[in-house]
Amino acid sequence: MILCYDIGGSFMRSGWRDKVGTMMEGHARPTPAHSWASFVDVIKEGASLSSASAVSLSIAGFFDRDTGIATVANVPCLDGRKVQDELSAELGLPVLLTNDADCFALAEAHCGVGVGKEVVFGVILGTGVGGGLVVNGQLLKGHGGVAGEWGHGPIVDPTCGGLIEDFPAISCGCGHVGCIDAICSARGMEKLHVGLHGTHKSSIQITEGWHAGDEDCGVTIEIFCEHLARALTVMLNALGADVVPVSGGLASEPALLTKIDKRVREMTLAHYAEPVVVPGMFARNGGLVGAGIAGQQAQATGRLAA
């Protein structure tokens, strides 16, 4: 059995796939984010109790296959460490690391809204913006372990196509200015609102205000959706995605996704008769489900063998 973990900054949840492929969820434990030894102990305990033959982890970061080094900002004890190799040595078991957005995309491609689709581009819209790309059921892994990360890169037009003027530059945590992650995440929506109106509201207050007819919140949502749709249109044109399942906190706003989807389909080169930007089926547990699929695929090809 492959023991799976979805590693978050606050909690780490375990699970495993049964014989028919259903993810059976186990315990949730607080993530020992600052202690490698404690982190290893939690995984060891789970592996021992479940008699695991391998471990597959979903992480909010990426793993460079060339250097073996993981970049995990929300779990400092994993950041900069050769997690896959070191954890395997500690456990005496094969270990696989997969980005959480990649896991979500795998879950949707195999079991969710992307079933039967050739190209599935899974998108995370939460505290950050991420993505994962699955082609013919297989996860695309790029140079340095990065692929589908459309949230980063200085591409944002600060005028939003001439809709606004004199908008202040917003820096991103990656070091650039003008990233989608910095302006189209939940945090980005809040910064956008401050830049447009000079007042702070949480993303929840902004969306609630929009629904209630608040004019300022409506302007913020309009600009937010335009920024996001422009970038997402480029991704669809480049990737030829059949469907874009969405996870993350903002995925719980169906009206927001409908608005983004409408604008995207107005701008794409290909014609999409049906909605393409849609809520994912695995917004809650895509990390676990995808980690299970990634583990089984790796095991089948001999990449996750003892």
Image (tube, grey):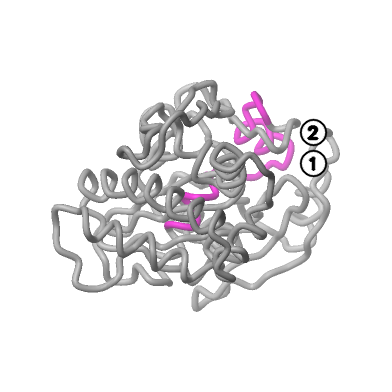
At a point 45% along the width and 44% down the height, the residue shown is: 303
**Amino acid found under the numbered disc labelled 1:** Phe
At a point 67% along the width and 59% down the height, the residue shown is: 205
Q: Position of residue 56 (x, y in %)?
A: 59, 51
Q: Which mark is residue 39?
A: 1
Q: Position of residue 93 (x, y in %)?
A: 65, 45
217 w.r.t. 91: above or below: below
At a point 30% along the width and 70% down the height, the residue shown is: 275
294 w.r.t. 175: above or below: below
Residue of label 2: 36
- In this view of the protein, which residue sits in the foreground, 297 or 110? 110
* Region in magenta: 79-105
- In this view of the protein, which residue sits in the foreground, 246 or 48? 246
- In the image: residue 43, left or right of residue 254: right
Crowd around label 2: few <14 · some 14–19 · many ≥20 (10 Å): some
At a point 82% along the width and 33% down the height, the residue shown is: 34
Q: Do the residues labelled 2 and 1 touch (CB within 8 Å)?
A: yes
Disc 1 is placed on an element classified as: helix
**Amino acid found under the numbered disc labelled 2:** Trp
